Amino acid sequence: ATLQLLRLLMAAEEAVANGVAAAEGVAKGVVRTHKQPVAKSSFGGIDSWKFWAFFAWICLFVEAAGTAYIGYVHLREPDGNLPQMGFAFVGEVKKRKGCDEWAVLLRHFTAVLGCSELARAAACFLALFVGGDAMICGFVGELAFNGLLFYAYGEFPSYWGGKGKGPGKSPPLDLLYASVGISATGLIAALVGRSRRTMHLLRRR
C-alpha cells in the first residue's frame, strides 16, 4: 500500500510538471508570435523612414550650403558683392568726393548681412548634426525667413539691375522660389519620415 501511494504521488508530481512546462511553452509561443517581423515598405531594401529621413537631410544640406555661400560672398567679396548683383551705383559712390562714409556704410551693411546668412547656415548645419525634430525646426525656420523675404521684396523693392533700370525694380525671385521649394519638400519628407519611424517602433513593441 505504501509503495502504491508513493507511485501515485510521483505520477501526480510528474503530471503537474508536464502541465507547467506545457503552459510555459504556450506562453512563449504567444510571445514569439507577437514579435514576428512585420512586413514593411522599403526603397531598394532601405526602410522607408530611413529613406525619407535621408532625403530630408539632403534638402537641408543643400539649403545650408547655399546659404553659407551667399553669406560668404557678402562678407568677403569686394564691395559686399553688390556690383556682381547689378548695383552699379556702388562704384560711382566710391568715385565721388566726400562719399567715403557712404561706401563704408554700404560695406558695413553687406558684412552684417553676410554674418547673418552664415549664422543661419550654421543653425541648419547644427540641425543636420542633431537630426530628428531639429531638422523639422530648421525647415520651419527657413520657410519663415523666406516668407519674410517675400514681404520685404514686395513692400521695399530695391534698386536692382544697375544704371538705367530705375528704382523699384524687384530682384529676381528664382533663387527665393528655389529655396522655398527645397525647404517645403524637405519639411514634408522629414514629417513623413518621422511618422514612418514612429509606426516602425510601435510595430517592434
Image: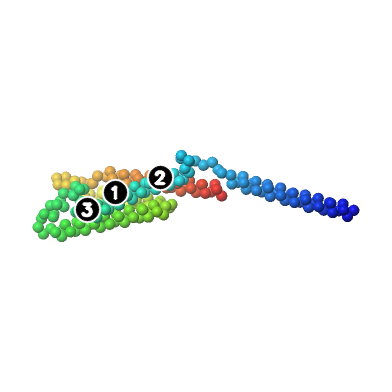
Give the colouring mode of the picture.
rainbow
Residue 96 visible within the image: yes
Residue at which label 2 appears: 55
Q: Earlier in the sequence, mark 3 or mark 1?
A: 3
Q: Amino acid at mark 3?
A: Glu
Q: Nearer the viewer, residue 37 or 99?
A: 37
Residue drawn at (18%, 59%) of the image: 104
Instruction: Please state the horizontal and vertical placement of residue 116, each as a whole percent of the image.
Output: 29, 56
Residue at which label 1 appears: 150
Q: Nearer the viewer, mark 2 or mark 1?
A: 2
Instruction: Please state the horizontal and vertical placement of residue 7, each as a whole percent of the image.
Output: 84, 51
Q: Nearer the viewer, mark 3 or mark 1?
A: 3
Q: Amino acid at mark 2?
A: Phe
Q: Amino acid at mark 1?
A: Phe
Task: State how far apart marks 3 and 2 are (Cα).
Answer: 33 Å
**In the image, farthest residue toward the top:** 44
Instruction: Say left or right for 202 vs 148.
Output: right
Question: How many badges with numbers are in the image?
Answer: 3
At label 2, counting other C-alpha atoms closer than 10 Å, the crowd grade (few under 14, some 14-19, many 20 or more) is: some
**In the image, farthest residue toward the left:** 97
At label 3, counting other C-alpha atoms closer than 10 Å, the crowd grade (few under 14, some 14-19, many 20 or more) is: some
Q: Earlier in the sequence, mark 2 or mark 1?
A: 2
Q: Earlier in the sequence, mark 3 or mark 2?
A: 2
Instruction: Say left or right for 124 vs 17.
Output: left
Task: State how far apart marks 3 and 1 are (Cα).
Answer: 25 Å
Residue at which label 3 appears: 77
Q: Nearer the viewer, residue 159 or 155?
A: 159
At label 1, counting other C-alpha atoms closer than 10 Å, the crowd grade (few under 14, some 14-19, many 20 or more) is: some
Task: State how far apart marks 2 and 1 are (Cα).
Answer: 26 Å
Residue drawn at (21%, 48%) of the image: 85
